[in-house]
Amino acid sequence: MAQIIDGKKISAQIREEIAAEVAQMKAEGTVPGLAVIIVGENPASKVYVRNKGKGCAEVGMYSEIIEMAEETTQAELLSKIDELNARCDIHGILVQLPLPKQIDERAVIAAISPSKDVDAFCAPNIGEMMLGTADFLPCTPAGIMQLLARSGIEVAGKECVVIGRSNIVGKPISQLLLAENGTVTICHSKTKNLAEVTRRADILVVAIGRADFVTGDMVKEGAVVIDVGMNRRADGKLTGDVDYASVEPKASFITPVPGGVGPMTITMLLKNTLTAAKKQK
Ligand code: GUN
C-alpha cells in the first residue's frame, strides 16, 4: 500500500507561504504582477490560464490575462511582449503554449526578458538551471522536487528513471534530480527494454502523455512513482500516465491524478512570480 502524495495539500501549504510574503511585499509598496498571454481558442489552454489568474488572486498578486485572436501574427505577439517587458508593474510574463502554427514558439520565448520568464523556458534560464544558479526553475519539475522534499523522500544516491524527454518536463526534471545527486536515466520512445529500465527505479517519473502506460509489472516493489500525465478519457475523466490500480500496491509513495503533480505547477509559477518581483524591486 503506497502513501499518497497529496499535491493539493502541499500546494496549499506553499501558497500560504507565498501569500505571507506577498502581504509583506505589499506592505512595502510592491504588488507582484503576472501577465498571461493566450493566443487563440484552445479550450484546455483557456482553463489553465483562468486557473493561473485565480491562483494569483488567491495569494494576493496582480494578474492580467491578455487574450489575442487565433490569427495574431508573430510580430503582433512580439510587440505585446516588448510592451510587457518594459512595464514595472508586471514582474512575470507567461505565454500559454501551444501557439497557433503561424507563430514560432522559440522566437516568442526568446523575446521574454529572462528576468520575467517565470516559466523558465528561455535558453538563458535553462542554462542557469544546468549550472545550478537559476532564480527560476520550470514550474512542473520544480513542483515535483517540492513534492519529494516535503514528503521526506531523499534523492541522493537513488536510481531515478524519467520516462519522457520534453523541454517542459522530462529534460528539466532529469537535471533537477541530478542536481540532488540522484543517478538519473532518461527513457523515451526509442528506449529498448523499457520495463527493464523502469524496474531499476527507486524514483520513477512518468511524463509521456499516454494514459495508464506504466503498469505494475514495470515498477519495483517500494518505488516512489510520480505521475505527470494528464490525459482525458473518452468519458471525460482525467487520468495519468500510470495505471494506478496495478502500480499503487507496489509503490511506497505515489502521486494521484488528479491531485498530485497538477496543483503544483501553478503554485510554482506563483513562487517564480514572487521571486521575479523581489529581484526587480
Ligand atoms: N502549456 C502547457 N503547460 C504549460 C506551461 O507550463 N507553461 C506554458 N507557458 N504553457 C504551457
Image (cartoon, rainbow, N blue to C red):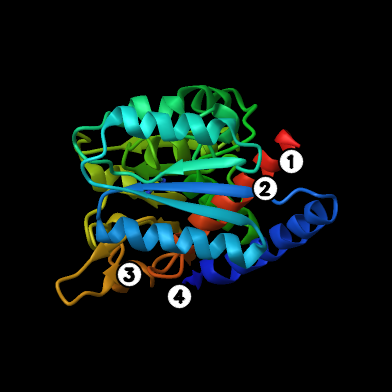
Which quarter of the picture shows residue 60?
bottom right
Please identify the residue farthest to the left as the structure is shown.
Answer: 234
At label 2, counting other C-alpha atoms closer than 10 Å, the crowd grade (few under 14, some 14-19, many 20 or more) is many
Query: Gap in Å between the C-alphas at discs 3 and 1?
Result: 40 Å
At label 3, counting other C-alpha atoms closer than 10 Å, the crowd grade (few under 14, some 14-19, many 20 or more) is many
Q: Amino acid at mark 2?
A: Leu
Label placed on residue 274: 2
Q: Which numbered mark, 2 or 4, is in the foreground of this view?
A: 2
Q: Which numbered mark, 4 or 1, is in the foreground of this view?
A: 1
Q: Which residue is mark 4?
A: 1
| Coordinates of residue 9 in the picture (x, y in percent) | 59, 71
Query: Gap in Å between the C-alphas at discs 2 and 4?
Result: 38 Å
Q: Which residue is mark 3?
A: 244
Q: Amino acid at mark 1?
A: Lys
Query: Gap in Å between the C-alphas at discs 4 and 1?
Result: 43 Å
Which is more N-terminal, label 3 or label 2?
A: 3
Which quarter of the picture shows residue 85?
top right
Instruction: Name the residue at 41% across, 29% down.
Output: 79
One can see residue 26 in this view:
yes
At label 4, counting other C-alpha atoms closer than 10 Å, the crowd grade (few under 14, some 14-19, many 20 or more) is few
Badge 4 marks a residue whose secondary structure is loop
Query: Gap in Å between the C-alphas at discs 4 and 3?
Result: 12 Å
Q: Which numbered mark, 4 or 3, is in the foreground of this view?
A: 3
| Coordinates of residue 16 in the picture (x, y in percent) | 70, 66
Q: With respect to residue 100, does 53 lie above or below?
A: below
Please identify the residue farthest to the right as the structure is shown.
Answer: 28
Q: Amino acid at mark 4?
A: Met
Q: Which residue is mark 1?
A: 278
Label placed on residue 241: none
Q: Is residue 135 left or right of residue 244?
A: right
